Image: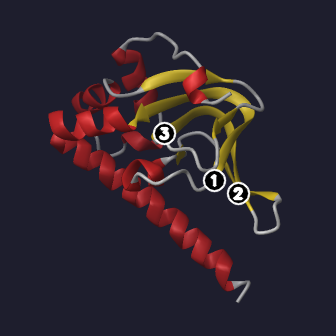
């Protein structure tokens, strides 16, 4: 089971905007911009153990955790799997594939049931065409998130060199 197998929860765009407003992703965005952004997200309830994204999946989307926790799992060179990160409230995943269009580099598995907002690649492209300013603001947030993770990874990597 993956996210595509789960039906979104029917909520209003205002409720999605409120969820965004209560996350760290709202910083720097006006309420009117959150309302625009809310038009492109869907809300999902996710259960323990569900693999939201499989490593190698080719259906990119941006996931934003509203509640619960997700484990990021990566295959190693010996056929095993290792947890490389645990993500909680306001953390995003799937952004790399959303940007570069390549298959997912890791799996994301629900480790504590909760809710997440998801934006498909089609919705992301629509956002960028229809509301370019808000699209650029989201891209900046994605870039900051990816930059933060790269800095953390570089910090850990130095210990192994």
State the SS at label 2.
Answer: strand
Measured Cα–Cα span from mark 1 to mark 3: 13 Å
Q: Residues within 10 Å of mark 1 (few under 14, many from 20)?
A: many
Quadrant of the snapshot with the N terminus: top right
Q: Earlier in the sequence, mark 1 or mark 3?
A: 3
| Residue that numbered label 2 is attached to | 74
Question: In the shown orientation, is residue 23 left or right of residue 114?
Answer: left
Quadrant of the snapshot with the C terminus: bottom right
State the SS at label 1.
Answer: loop
Q: Residue drawn 34% across and 26% down?
A: 38
Q: Is residue 138 above or below residue 122?
A: below
| Residue that numbered label 3 is attached to | 59
Q: Residue drawn 70% across and 40% down?
A: 109
Circles 1 and 2, Cβ within 8 Å, touching? The answer is yes
Circles 1 and 3, Cβ within 8 Å, touching? The answer is no
Measured Cα–Cα span from mark 3 to mark 2: 17 Å
Q: Is residue 7 visible?
A: yes
Residue furthest to the bottom in view is: 161
Q: Residues within 10 Å of mark 3 (few under 14, many from 20)?
A: some
Quarter of the image holding residue 34?
top left
Q: Earlier in the sequence, mark 3 or mark 2?
A: 3
State the SS at label 3.
Answer: loop
Q: Residue 31, image x and y in percent?
A: 27, 29
Q: Nearer the viewer, mark 3 or mark 2?
A: 3
Q: Residue drawn 39% across and 56% down?
A: 100
Q: Is residue 19 above or below residue 128?
A: above
Q: What colour scheme has been applied to the protein in the rendered image?
A: secondary structure
Q: Residue 56, image x and y in percent?
A: 59, 50
């Amino acid at each position: 089971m993956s996210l595509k197998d789960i039906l979104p929860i029917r909520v209003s765009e205002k409720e999605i905007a409120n969820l965004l407003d209560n996350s760290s992703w709202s910083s720097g965005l006006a309420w009117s911009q959150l309302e625009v952004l809310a038009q492109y997200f869907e809300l999902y309830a996710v259960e323990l153990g569900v693999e939201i994204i499989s490593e190698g999946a080719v259906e990119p989307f941006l996931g934003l955790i509203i509640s619960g926790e997700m484990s990021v799992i990566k295959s190693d060179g010996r056929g095993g799997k290792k947890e490389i990160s645990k993500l909680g409230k306001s953390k995003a995943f799937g952004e790399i594939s959303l940007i570069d269009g390549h298959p997912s580099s890791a799996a994301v598995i629900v480790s504590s049931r909760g809710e997440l907002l998801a934006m498909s690649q089609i919705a992301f492209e629509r956002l960028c065409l229809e509301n370019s300013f808000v699209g650029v603001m989201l891209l900046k947030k994605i870039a900051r998130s990816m930059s933060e993770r790269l800095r953390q990874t570089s910090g850990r990597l130095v210990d192994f060199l």
